[in-house]
Image (spheres, rainbow, N blue to C red):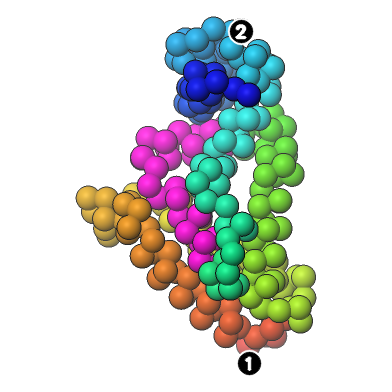
Amino acid sequence: PPTTTSHSTRERILLSAHGIFAEKGFRSATVFDIVSAAGTNQASINYHFGSKVKLYHEVLRYSFRRMVDLENIEPWTVQGSPEEKLRALIRSMLGAVALDEKWHQANHRLLMWETLVPSGGFEELVSGEMLPHFKKVMTIVRDLLGDKESEESLALKCMWLVGACGFFAHMPPLIDAHFPNGQLRSPDALDKLGDFLTNLCLNGLLSAVPNAWPAIPAG
């Protein structure tokens, strides 16, 4: 099993690599840049990740998991009613609100690099992290809505749910403009925000017409 020192070195490399890849992109970033920032050596990269490519893919996974706070909350392991599981899911997706602004800026640059100069890492992130996460979201919402909901309608409602919560992860400057001095960044405030959004989502999901896809044109 990894030692505390080994785990600390791995975390330090991930944090440093996240910043370097965000600044320079995958192709321009070098292993020397990363180990210099992390205060370690290339042997540590090889030991913990195997290569620059594997490190980059791990940075993308690490970034996603921090955004949805999977390191601290596993909503699908929560015991209780479908409503309680939904609340745990929403609370996990609000975890990124507590991350500092510099991390958010770096994360946006990292994803922008991958969009402008694709390395193939995003496809692996989608298949390895995003899709499995979304399927688990669908399972939670399926338990809430019942078996009569079609897969297409269920998927769209889950996309709406993830988008509504994702706003808080991706728009911290706008949130801070309305709630200055970090009013929404403390664990207690995020718990209350989770309750508030859960009530909104429950009202929206449970009052929506089942299988309302494709939509009936207005008029």
SS of the residue under disc 1: loop
Of residues 32 and 40, the one drawn nearer to the viewer in this rendering: 40
Q: Where does residue 185 sit, x and y in percent of width and height?
A: 33, 51
Of residues 214 and 190, the one drawn nearer to the viewer in this rendering: 190
Residue 212 versus residue 174 in the image, above or below: below
Q: Where does residue 79 sit, x and y in percent of width and height?
A: 59, 64
Give the residue type that dot 2 points to. Ala
- Mark 2 sits on what residue? 43
Residue 78 versus residue 31 in the image, above or below: below
Neighbor class of circle 1 (other Cα within 10 Å; few <14, some 14-19, many 20+) is: few
What is the quadrant of the C terminus in the image? bottom right
Give the residue type that dot 1 points to. Gly
Image point (45%, 11%), residue name? 39
SS of the residue under disc 2: helix
Judged left or right of residue 114, residue 18 is left
Judged left or right of residue 41, residue 1 is right
Quarter of the view holding residue 148: bottom right
Q: Can the viewer see residue 177 in this picture?
A: no
Q: Which residues fall within the magenta stretch? A: 86-113
